[in-house]
Structures are given as structure tokens and as C-alpha cells.
Amino acid sequence: MKRILLALLTTLPALAFAQQSSDIEAGVIPQNPNGIVPTQVEPFKPAHPVTSKGFMRKSGNLPYKFDTLGFTYYDLQTNASVGNRVLVHADGKVSVAWTYSPDGTAEFPLRGSAYNHHNNTAWGAPPTSRIETNLRLGWPSIGVLPGNKEYVISHFATSGGLHVMTNDAIGGSNWTTGPRVLTIAGGKPIWNRADNNGNTIHVLTNYSDSAASTDPPNIRVDGMLLPTTYSRSTDGGQTWSTALSMLPGYDTSRYLRGGGDQYAIDANGNNVAIVIADNLGGDVALWKSTDNGQTFTKIIVDTFAFAPYKTDKVIGSNVPTNDGSVDVVMDNNGYAHVFWGYSEVSKNHPSADSSFFTPASNRIMYWGEQNNVKRIIGGMMDMDGDTQLTVAYGTPRSLGANNTLPRLQDSLGTVDLISVARYGNTSLATMPSAMVDAQGRIFCVYSAPLEGDLYASNEARETSNYRDLFITFSTDGGITWADPQNITQGHGYEDVFGCVGKTIVNNVLHVIWQRDEIPGTNLQNNSSDGSHPTVNNVILHASIPVQAIINNQIGLGPGVSVEEIDQPNVYITNGFYPNPTSNGGEVEIFLTETSPVTLTVTNLLGQTVATQDLGKQAPGNTTVKVATDSLAAGVYMYNISTGKYAVSGKMVVTK
């Protein structure tokens, strides 16, 4: 078993992390005060472990570029699960949404939902205002309705309920804010997750804690405190025939309370999948509908042996559970694929202060319905090949009492941390975001700290790691998984909250995420000394060539050596556009090295109808112009070759 080494080993068997003050109105869930940071934990073991040392901490020659979509001073996009925030349309256009604030004013009064759109030519300018009309909303979910109207659903955290915003067309900038829906006396349902099948919108929410003295007592439904509920509209969100209902089997026999952002939803036609995770002491369970949400069947995907977990129940040490971050996708054959972050809990004495969890857990888990397989598919990576995983002390930790940074003792003396960077109650490897394409290939993006990438210090014992986004995939229905690859490789930046688009068009996978200058978030990790001030975070996007992922072209970063795989030097980043065309078009490719490029166009009989020598092209993105004025109307194939490798696609010419 490979060890995971924490930079600081204390003489205490467990470390209690005091709960920081919470901003319930903003949707921030308090961090659990009791965390154990062990000296050893079984890590993720890739099939091809790193073999070299001396990781070069800088971005490499990635086969795609980063697009800046916008900014936000409000830096908490979720407490656990990421949700649906990337919408890929059938023609390749892309729309995205995120929680946004234009400034760092206290309480973020201008917080709302930001939106941007790629029209197959370019992204819009970074937004400078929210799409809502004079409402402080957050936690958006995005989708498209019949008639090509897009919707964004966001919550109103002050008193609960959701607003459905719609625009006039795909990519449209004129947004209409609908009335507040899914409200209830005595409760505050927020933290929505939504997806739709035509006009039928499926929504999950969770009741928020009552924060103010004037609030009513925390709501119970059928005996459960603050549960997760399901709602359904069949008219595009105007009315809700099912409102804040409890799913079958979601009851006090296995659950004591719900939890914000600990759930996910996916709709593929009439097949609807819902996953709820009972964070730090509960099951991961799937609810599946084959009739567009009219009825659901429950399947326990990962069983917690002691559910429902009460704080006075002695359960022993290191009992497997989940960290609350989950995702679920339905494939075209009607099978569900479930993902979650792994954690462990311990309780060896009935006293109230003896319950602990393990925020240094390091696994991304997967379960597939078709083959009933459970797999460990990802985790924080050993970047220097020394068979030991070094985690900076602040990475899995939270603030202490009165929002102070922890001070500890080790063999070298007193350690004053300059940073803590735990996200809620999640683990080292966390926040899976997944999709399955038309070929049945499954892709999962997740967040993990990057070994050796330290904030503001060369001493891991006093600071935190930066995070990157990693991707892994399966081409056999989830039975086997490829080694993770680092898709951000952002030395000196915190890349987190990765969200993947659910559709592949033009052979690219769309991912958005938030980039920060400081590990963790201002809302969860800013100490009384101002260790994480409010800064302007960047929302980034990448169109990642699918073949670059499949061929392991991305890898872990420069200076990291794994088993060598022959890798192409040309990729399509944007397919032929416009398609169909009556007046030519263009294809955007990415070259990993200087290469001679040749364009060939053939008809469906394989006959060459056009060819062009484009000469030597430099590494990076290149736009290939394709003239069609000499071609008759019909379907053609274009082939772009570098001699040893080639990429191709289909184009339709009209006259």
C-alpha cells in the first residue's frame, strides 16, 4: 500500500476543526468541525504510475486553449455536487451559467446568475450584470425548452423558492424572470438541480437551515429534518404538478436529514435518474424513472452499514461513506452511471464529541447499472514518482474557532498555517462531473489537489496545495477506466468546480471551471486575519478534442513520465462550420508540433475532388479554409493530414 504523507504529523490521534461562521442566506453550508487527518490512506493506483521525478510545475502544450467566459467575486459555486451548468446544443453552440457577483461588497447584494454563449464563431463578452431582474439569486441550472428558448433556474436563498428565467432564443440576451415557484410556508427550499425532457422540467431542492431568529423552526417532512425533495413541471416551469415531494424509499428508515448540494439529476428522454448522497454517514442511492418522472424505483448503489447514522451510535473506525459530491448520467440504452467522492467516518465512543470523518480521503467512485460494477476511477496523483503522496497541511483542513487559522506542534516546533483550503465537508478527490456520449464512452472530470503545487510558501507544512481538474474515461461501459489526465495544468492557480457538457458535437468535450489565485474559497476559508480575501475569480472554458483524451495526449503535465503511447500531432478543435454551407467554410485544428498540412476533399465514392498544400504550420490552433465554389451540391469528406496522422469530417454543400 502506498502511503499518503501529510506535511505535518501531530502527536494527537485526531484533530478537531472548529466550525466557522456560516452564511446560510448565501447558500454556504457550515463545515463539519470534527475531522481526522490520517498519516496513511489507500490512494488511487493508476495502471501506469508516474516513473520520473522533478515535476515541472507549469502548463504544457495542451491540444486546446482556455477561453475566458467571465468573472465573479462570489467564489462558491457549490457545497458539494456541481450540477448542470454547460448546455451543448445539437448544432455545436454552447451556453453556460454560473453564480456571479460583479464586486466584493459585503453580503454580495448584486449576486445572481451569469450567462454566456458560443455561437459557433466566438464567445460573447464577459457579462457585467446578472440575468435576473433585481433579485439576489444563485446556484443556476441551465437547459433548453421546445421553441429554442433557454432557461436558467436559480434559488432565492433569503426566504426560499426558485425563479425560472427564460430568454427569447438560443444565445439570446433578453431574459424574462418568472415569478417565484416551489415555495412553502415554514421552509426554504433552495440549492436546485434541474434537467428537462422537452417541456417537462425535473427539479431537486433541499430545505435550508433557518438562520435568523425570526425564521420558523427548521422544517421536518414525514419526520425527516430538512429533506431533499423532487418537483416536476410539464409546461416549461409555469406550473408544478409535483411540488416538493419525497421520493419513494427516501425516509427515516435510512435517513435522518437531507443536505444541500448532495444530489444530482439527469434526464435522457423519458428516462430520469436521481442520485442522493447522505454526506458523511449514509447511502449513495439512485432513483430511476422510465416514464418521465411519474414513478421512481430506488436502488442503493453504495450502502452505509450503519444507516441511519445517529451521533451516539458507536460504529468503529474508518467506515466507508461518501463526501456528498455526486453525479449521475443516463446512457442511450437507459442505464444509469453514478459517481461520488469517497470518505470515511469513525466513532468509537458514544460521547457527542467523538464523531470524526476523514477529509483526506482520496477516491472518486463509480457504479454502473448495466454491469452492476463498482470501481475506484480517480484520485489525487503522485506527481513526482516517489511512491509517496505529499499533501500540504492546510489542504484538507478548515478554520478553527472564531475563524482562526490552526496552530499546531510537530517535531520541528510550532506551525502557524497561512492557508486552509477544504471545500465544505468534501475529500481530497471530489466533485465528479460526468457525461456519456452516443457511442457509450463515459467521461468523468473531477477535482484534486496537485502534489508539489503550493500556495505562497515552499513549506508544505504551513500552506495548502492548489487544485487542478482531472479527467478519466471508459470505452467499455464502465468496466475498465483509463489513467486520469490533468486537463488544466495550472501551476499557481486553483482550478475547481469543473462542469462537463452532456453532449459531444464536432468531436470535442466542453468543460467550464472557476480559477482562483488562492486555494479554497473566500466564503469558506477566509480567516479573521484575512487569509483568503475577496478576489475576482475567472470562469474558464475548454473545448477538448475527444481523441486527445482517448489517446492520452493530455497526460499529467510536462516533466512527468508515464508509459509511452504513440500520440497524434493533429486534432480537430472545431469541426467544419457552417455546415451545411453554400459558400465555403472552415475547420479549426490544433497541432502539437510544426507540421506540413495538406487538405483533401473527397466525394462519397472516395474520389478526390479538391486538394491543397497548406505548407508548414506552427504548433497551436490553425484555421483551415475550405473553398466549395467548385463543388456540386452534395455530401463530402474533408481530410487534413500532417503526413503521419490525419483527421477528417463530413461537410454538406448546398447551392
Image (cartoon, helix red, strand yellow):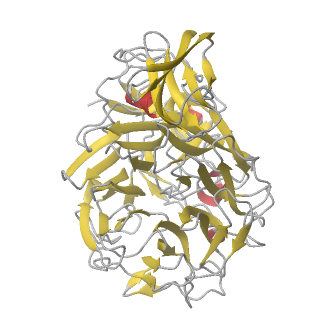
Q: Is residue 467 visible?
A: no
Q: Position of residue 257 (x, y in %)?
A: 40, 75
Q: Is residue 253 visible?
A: yes
Residue under the point 44% across and 14% down: 53
Q: Is residue 548 left or right of residue 610?
A: left
* Image quadrant assignment for residue 215: bottom right
Q: Residue furthest bottom?
A: 185
Q: Is residue 487 left or right of residue 20?
A: left
Check the image and report above or below for 257 versus 271: below
Q: Nearer the viewer, residue 636 or 486?
A: 636
Q: Nearer the viewer, residue 349 or 273?
A: 273
Q: Nearer the viewer, residue 189 or 438?
A: 438
Residue under the point 32% across and 32% down: 482
Q: In the rendered picture of this protein, how many numbered marks are placed on residues?
A: 0
Q: Residue furthest left?
A: 371
Q: Position of residue 144 (x, y in %)?
A: 55, 63
Check the image and report above or below for 554 versus 495: above
Check the image and report above or below for 375 versus 157: above
Q: Position of residue 473 (x, y in %)?
A: 36, 38
* Image quadrant assignment for residue 190: bottom right
Q: Is residue 631 left or right of residue 431?
A: right
Q: Position of residue 217 (x, y in %)?
A: 54, 87
The image quadrant where one finds the C terminus is: top right
Residue under the point 40% across and 25% down: 552
Residue under the point 60% across and 29% down: 628
Q: Is residue 132 left or right of residue 261?
A: right
Check the image and report above or below for 216 versus 260: below
The image quadrant where one finds the N terminus is: top left
